[in-house]
Image (cartoon, rainbow, N blue to C red):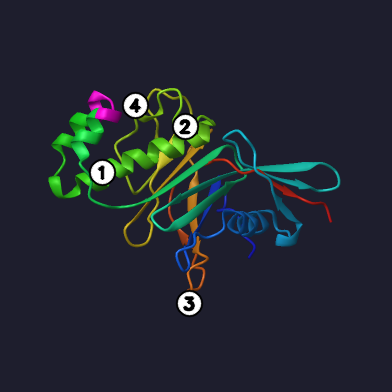
């Protein structure tokens, strides 16, 4: 599948793979699919290499130089999500919505502003709101190459908005958003360098389903470098 960028827009592509028989979808396979689509090359040309730090890169040797594309990986809620972006660092995080002791967790991990915001939210939606903040923090940490180190859980996020990406308070030139995701999944994408379009490309590994392309909004990055062999 060739993935053409959204015209005149920095674009992040997110691929979602579902577990099969209790086994998670292969991040390496999803990265090869995503990288091949974005770079317009065969999957066989792509090699996935693990690195010790929190960076993920897709590199292609074109013969006259290398093209490097940041990428990101997340596993949660029975799915594996990978994101690739040609425009700069990206981070992705996915969780399945579930009931949580929200205020207790928030007081432990979040700053006072976010605790107060959650306390004022309707009780029925608090778990979802908590996880939207959490996935945003994870995605931003990945985009910055820090994970949740350096105070990541207390790094303040914008109020979640599923319609667009928003700038992260107190962090220059970093944006985060929550593209639409099927079912009870919550997906966050973060980018460095300016707002981006987010395209959720697919439930690529879900048995019996085709691969839809659903345009959303937003941004992202993580921890596996992908190297593309020159042909």
Question: From mark 3 to mark 4, how far is it between C-alphas?
Answer: 41 Å
Does residue 9 appear in the picture of this structure?
no
Disc on the earlier residue, 3 or 1? 1
Query: Are circles 3 and 1 on residues that touch, CB within 8 Å?
Result: no
Question: From mark 4 to mark 1, how far is it between C-alphas?
Answer: 15 Å
Tag 3's secondary structure?
Answer: loop
Residue 112 painted magenta: yes
Tag 4's secondary structure?
Answer: helix
Residue 208 bears which disc, if any?
A: 3
- Relative to 92, does residue 103 appear above or below in the rendering? above
- Relative to 105, does residue 74 appear above or below in the rendering? below
Q: How many marks?
A: 4
Tag 2's secondary structure?
Answer: strand
Q: Main secondary structure of the magenta part?
A: helix
Q: Which residue is mark 1?
A: 129
Magenta-tinted stretch:
108-114
Residue 154 bears which disc, if any?
A: 4
Residue 174 bears which disc, if any?
A: 2
Disc on the earlier residue, 3 or 4? 4
The quarter in which the C terminus is drawn is bottom right
Please provide percent x and percent y for residue 190.
46, 39
């Amino acid at each position: 599948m060739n993935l053409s960028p959204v015209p005149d827009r920095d674009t992040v592509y997110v691929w979602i793979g579902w577990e099969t028989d209790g086994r998670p979808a292969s991040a390496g396979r999803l990265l090869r699919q995503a990288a091949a689509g974005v770079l317009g090359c065969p999957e066989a040309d792509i090699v996935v290499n693990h690195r010790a730090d929190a960076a993920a890169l897709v590199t292609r040797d074109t013969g006259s130089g290398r093209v490097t594309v940041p990428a990101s990986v997340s596993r949660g809620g029975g799915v594996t999500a990978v994101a690739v972006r040609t425009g700069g660092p990206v981070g992705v995080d996915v969780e399945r919505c579930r009931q949580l002791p929200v205020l207790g967790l928030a007081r432990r991990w979040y700053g006072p502003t976010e605790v107060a915001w959650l306390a004022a939210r309707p009780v029925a939606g608090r778990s979802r709101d908590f996880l939207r903040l959490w996935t945003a923090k994870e995605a931003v940490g990945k985009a910055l190459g820090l994970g949740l180190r350096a105070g990541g859980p207390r790094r303040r996020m914008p109020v979640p908005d599923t319609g667009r990406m928003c700038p992260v308070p107190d962090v220059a030139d970093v944006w985060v958003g929550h593209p639409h995701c099927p079912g009870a999944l919550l997906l966050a994408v973060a980018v460095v360098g300016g707002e981006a379009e987010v395209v959720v490309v697919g439930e690529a590994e879900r048995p019996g389903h085709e691969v839809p392309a659903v345009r959303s909004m937003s941004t992202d990055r993580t921890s596996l470098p992908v190297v593309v062999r020159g042909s």
